[in-house]
Image (tube, rainbow, N blue to C red):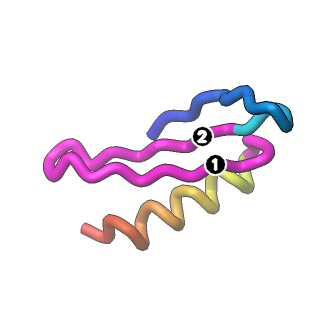
């Protein structure tokens, strides 16, 4: 899992990225703020997308 700060015309967003290196499947999510709650929500989203 990684996170990147993305500058847009509207302001700053945060891009969460999770990659399954075996299948090369990537899951991403843009959020307004990066904190524990949004990181946890991304992990839950990642586990639903790649449950193995």
Q: Please give the count of numbered marks on the rendered protein.
A: 2
Q: Main secondary structure of the magenta part?
A: strand
| Residue to which mark 1 is pinned | 30
Q: Earlier in the sequence, mark 2 or mark 1?
A: 2
Question: Is the Cβ of the residue at disc 2 closer than 8 Å to that at disc 1?
Answer: yes
As drawn, the residue found furthest toward the left would be 22
Place of residue 10 in the rendered image (x, y in percent of width and height, measured from the top left): 85, 37
In the image, the segment drawn in magenta is 14-35
> Is disc 1 surrounded by few (<14), some (14 to 19) or many (20+) residues within 10 Å?
some
As drawn, the residue found furthest toward the front would be 9
| Residue to which mark 2 is pinned | 15
* Label 2 element class: strand
Place of residue 46 in the rendered image (x, y in percent of width and height, measured from the top left): 44, 61
Place of residue 4 in the rendered image (x, y in percent of width and height, measured from the top left): 59, 29
Residue at horizontal 79 percent and vertical 43 percent from the top = 33
Pick the front one: 23 or 52 = 23
Residue at horizontal 33 percent and vertical 45 percent from the top = 19
């Amino acid at each position: 899992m990684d996170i990147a700060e993305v500058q847009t015309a509207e302001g700053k967003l945060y891009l969460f990225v999770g990659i399954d290196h075996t299948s090369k499947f990537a899951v991403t999510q843009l959020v307004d703020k990066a904190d524990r709650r949004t990181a946890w929500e991304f992990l839950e989203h990642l586990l639903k997308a790649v449950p193995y």
